[in-house]
Image (tube, rainbow, N blue to C red):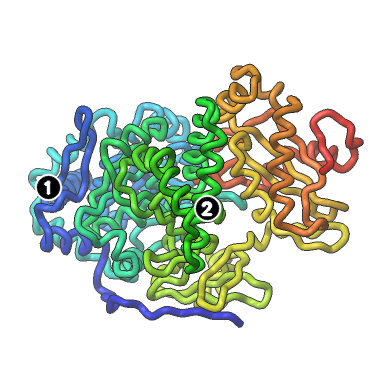
Amino acid sequence: MVQFEVPAIVPADPQANVTDLLVERVKATPGLALFAVPEGDGWRDITAADFHAQVVALAKGFAAAGLEPGDKVGFIARTTYEWTLVDFALFFAGAVMVPIYETSSPAQVAWNLADSGAVACIVESAEHSARLDEVRSDLPLIRSVWAMHNGDLDTLSAQGAGVTDAEIERRRNIANGADIATLIYTSGSTGRPKGCVLTHSNFVELTRNSGKALSEVVEVPGASTLLFITTAHIFARFISILNVVGGVKTGHQPDTKNLLPALASFKPTYLLAVPRVFEKVYNSAEQKAEAGGKGKIFRSAAQTAIEHSKLLQDGKKIPFLMKIKFALFDRLVYSKLRAAMGGRVEFAVSGSAPLGSRLGHFFHSLGITILEGYGLTETTAPATVNLAKKSKIGTVGPVLPGVGMRLADDGEIQVRGINVFREYWRNPEATAAAFDGDWFKTGDIGTFDEEGFLTITGRKKEIIVTAGGKNVAPAALEDPIRANPIVGQVVVVGDQKPFISALITLDPEMLPTWLGNNGLAADMPLADCAKNDAVRAEVQRAIDNANKSVSRAESIRKFVILADEWTEASGHLTPKMSIKRNVIMDDYAIAVEELYSVPVSTTNVSLS
């Protein structure tokens, strides 16, 4: 059995909880700008000491309002400064946050609040209030609702003026490392969400050790990041707390449509993103160049960047002519992309889905090292991550300090260590099924190289077995196809079928530019696009490219372009934009059957 285990760098402190991380930061650097909030065309800094004062004031408000240590509190909000303020205020009040995705339906809101036993809920907007109101009658335990859009956070802080500092100090010190810090519900990609009990030690030990492992990213003077992915997800939540440990200045931008202007003004040194963001940056730049008659230049620049990065990674000498081409493209292309992201980004942490080596090498040549990592809610986010001085593009890196990882006989990744959750909330059966002793069974399949770098090959439950007995990992085909600018989502099918096929959706955000660049009406309806010969040919090119990396038995032989868009609202994507494969297979069962029964000549179905 392949196994890698790295000892913790920082000695464990079983008595410490998350509040200690902020207290230590304030003692060390009270005047350090720990956050920045939008103000006019710029940003206003908030020091560690000021943030701590606001946290304590709000914690006093929660105490005055009747919250008791251990109480569960639901929270529905976008990624803003107030999200982290509420997070730490609840920690200081001794309460337990139950984060809820801002896009969750009323039924999902009801499940998370009811299953957790929450006694209160905080909502950001009138829309969130309306969703909660729809199910309020089903939530008899909820006795308080605070609405941020009505100024309730300021009201709470004012009402807590009579609560003493000693009371908050007492409350914040009640929990030790083994106690529950937060209850995060899984995204539900494989069924009803389960509540993951993450402890204070999960956050304390993992952030302290990760801070040292990623010291070149988060422990350097002037480090800063702009968060824009949802803080309700463990990935951004972990980074928020890690930034407090490292003293990183954090800004927030909840509206990704305003991301580029925010990056230009905030000028972060590192980013946190999912692969779809990097794909969008690349595809948008390519289509913009195409529209300006410079598509050929961009594609040549991209190819040069990828080849340049590969040579660097392999430790090979850069040929003289490539140096000249690289310098030219740096002036014409790369520098403009760097400037668009603020001009100071050196690192980007990527997770939640595979990035692909092509994009990794492209951004590396831009001067941006993408540190791809791997983890789940159950592992408090990262279990492995590429490091500034120990990185391999195309892998998700080595295991972090304090973490152990092994591969079972069938290739399943199993994890133990400081980051592994305690249990599934009120679900002992699911908890027992998820562990082999102290090893958490992730359900993911992977391989290690001789240096301990992990590569993810797919989900154990998603492996397709064709009628001919061939095992196929869908992700190996889906990820490169999804990288195409006009492709929205992909689901590879073919379990117990004679060959592999694919369901394809189009990206309505990228389509208008691509259509215009290809001499077609930019406002062509999605249904017409799905049947258009030029669109089909572009999708076919993407599929042909993906097929090059697999055997013929594993290759996609047919595909159908759907006239639908898969979104979180449609029920086909999770909040972190992962596909709900089981839901899609149920909803599109007829489309799948037609792939194996309709003649090849049928409109919108192609045989490669």
Q: Amino acid at mark 1?
A: Asp
41 or 295, which is in the foreground?
295
Q: Amino acid at mark 2?
A: Ile
Whether residue 530 is visible? yes
Answer whether labels 1 and 2 touch (C-beta < 8 Å): no
Check the image and report above or below for 289 versus 443.
Answer: above
For label 1, the residue is 50
In the image, residue 374 lies at what x, y percent? Answer: 49, 61
Q: Is 486 positioned to the left or the right of 5 in the image?
A: right
In the image, residue 422 lies at what x, y percent? Answer: 44, 68
Q: Is 130 positioned to the left or the right of 279 in the image?
A: left
In the image, residue 565 lies at what x, y percent? Answer: 62, 32
397 or 285, which is in the foreground?
285
Residue at x-position 66% and y-position 35%: 505
Q: CA distance from mark 1 to mark 2?
A: 45 Å
Check the image and report above or below for 263 versus 458.
Answer: above
The total number of labels drawn is: 2
Question: In which quadrant of the rendered image does the C terminus lie?
Answer: top right
In the image, residue 224 lies at what x, y percent? Answer: 26, 50
Which of discs 1 and 2 lies nearer the camera? The answer is 2
Check the image and report above or below for 166 versus 297.
Answer: below
463 or 268, which is in the foreground?
268
Residue at x-position 42% and y-position 61%: 380
